[in-house]
Structures are given as structure tokens and as C-alpha cells.
Image (spheres, rainbow, N blue to C red):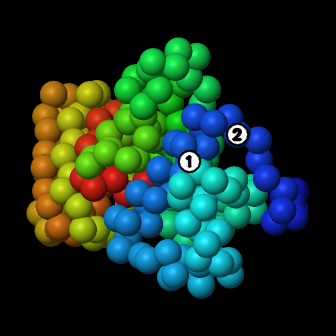
Amino acid sequence: MKSVLPPTTARTLQGSDERVLASDIRALRRVRGLTLAEIALKLGRSVGWVSQVERGLSTPSVGDLRAFAELFGVPISLFFSHEVPVESERGVVVRAGRRRSLGTSESGLVEELLSPDLSGSFEMVRSIFAAGAEMKTEQLRPTEEAGYIASGIFEIEIAGVWHRLGEGDSFRFEGKPYRWRNPGTEPAVVIWVVSPPVY
């Protein structure tokens, strides 16, 4: 059962986590070409409130984060930062046990954000494709993307052409429709780089 929280219930964040959340929301809005006014209208909030969220001056509630996630087409888990025990590593290093996980095993794709946040010019993601998983409908996004197959067998269709890739192979494309599948019997692990960040 989904818990319902009033919009005024703010989630608890520490100062550095607030900055990461603010920068992620700003980066997602910009990469989608949306203005503060458009976001405010879609969320039913004021432009001032959205601006304060993007500057880390207002902390959105869990309900607000769900609305942001739906608006941007990203999993809500993206907005929950993991604690960085060494302050000098914040925004620089992501430890293996502290990655932000995106997706679920039920979807056939689990991704971990390898980048510290979304404020840079690209993002790096570790994607684990379950055996037999596939993207049935091709996707097109205004990005340049590259991938390196760390393990398993991975097939990707780029602009109508299928490519079968194995461990150690890599690919790159820009602004072309694509879809993927894992025809193997084991998970395929792909290190995926996307510019600009879309998560």
C-alpha cells in the first residue's frame, strides 16, 4: 500500500544532500528544455518555489519528488542520495557500495549511477540487463551515447541496424533511434555514458 504524505511534509536532508538534489533537478529541467514557469505550471506550484528547490533553499516533500520523477520520466530513487562519509569525496568519488540504484529486477534492467550527480556534461551508468530482457519500442533522445560491454552478450539496434556485442566491445551513437535486448542466458553488464545527463 502506497503511503500518502501531505505536500508540506519535507523529507530530511543534510546540507550537502540538498545541494545534490537541487543540482539534479536543475540539470533534468535544463536537459529537457523546460523553463521554471513550465515546471511550476505542470506541478501546480509557484515559479518561486521551483526556483528555491533548484537553489537548495526549499526541500521538496516525498510527494513533490514523486511529481518531479513523473514529470521528468525518471525513477524516484534517483532523488535519494546516499550518504558520503568522506566530505572531500562528495561530488568526486562514488564508492561501489554507495551507488544510487535505478530500476528494478522485475523490469529486466537495473541501473546504478556511477556519476556523483547530474550536474556535469555527461553521466555514467552501470546497466545490468537480465537474460532475455529487451526494449520492445525504440527510443530517441537528443543525446550522444556510448557503451562498453563489461560482461555478457548485448544486442543494440541503432537506426534500424542490429549489432551483436560481447565482452570488451563498445558502441557510440548520437541522436538516433535505438533499442536493445539481451539474447543470452546470463545478465549483460554495460557501462553506459550519456551526454547530456538524462537521468
Residue 106 can be seen, yes or no: no
In front here: 157 or 19?
A: 19
Q: Secondary structure at mark 2?
A: loop
Q: Quadrant of residue 143?
A: bottom left
Q: Quadrant of residue 66?
A: bottom right
In the rendered image, residue 119, in percent from the top left (x then y), is placed at 38, 47
Residue 113 can be seen, yes or no: yes
In the rendered image, residue 14, in percent from the top left (x then y), is placed at 68, 35
| Residue located 59% across and 51% down the image | 56
Q: Quadrant of residue 159?
A: bottom left
Vertical placement of residue 15 versus 11, above or below: above
| Residue located 49% across and 75% down the image | 36
Number of marks drawn: 2
Residue 11 in the figure: left or right of residue 111: right
Which mark, by number, is residue 107?
Answer: none
- CB under 8 Å between discs 1 and 2: yes
| Residue located 47% across and 26% down the image | 90
The quadrant the C terminus occupies is bottom left
The mark nearer the N terminus, 1 or 2, is 2
Q: Residues within 10 Å of mark 1 (few under 14, many from 20)?
A: many
Residue 72 in the figure: left or right of residue 175: right
What's the residue type where badge 1 is placed?
Answer: Leu
Residue 74 in the figure: left or right of residue 60: left
In the rendered image, residue 145, in percent from the top left (x then y), is placed at 21, 52
The residue identified by callout 1 is 21
What's the residue type where badge 2 is placed?
Answer: Leu
In front here: 14 or 197?
A: 14
Residue 133 in the figure: left or right of residue 100: left
The residue identified by callout 2 is 13
In the rendered image, residue 104, in percent from the top left (x then y), is placed at 58, 45
Vertical placement of residue 101 versus 67, above or below: above
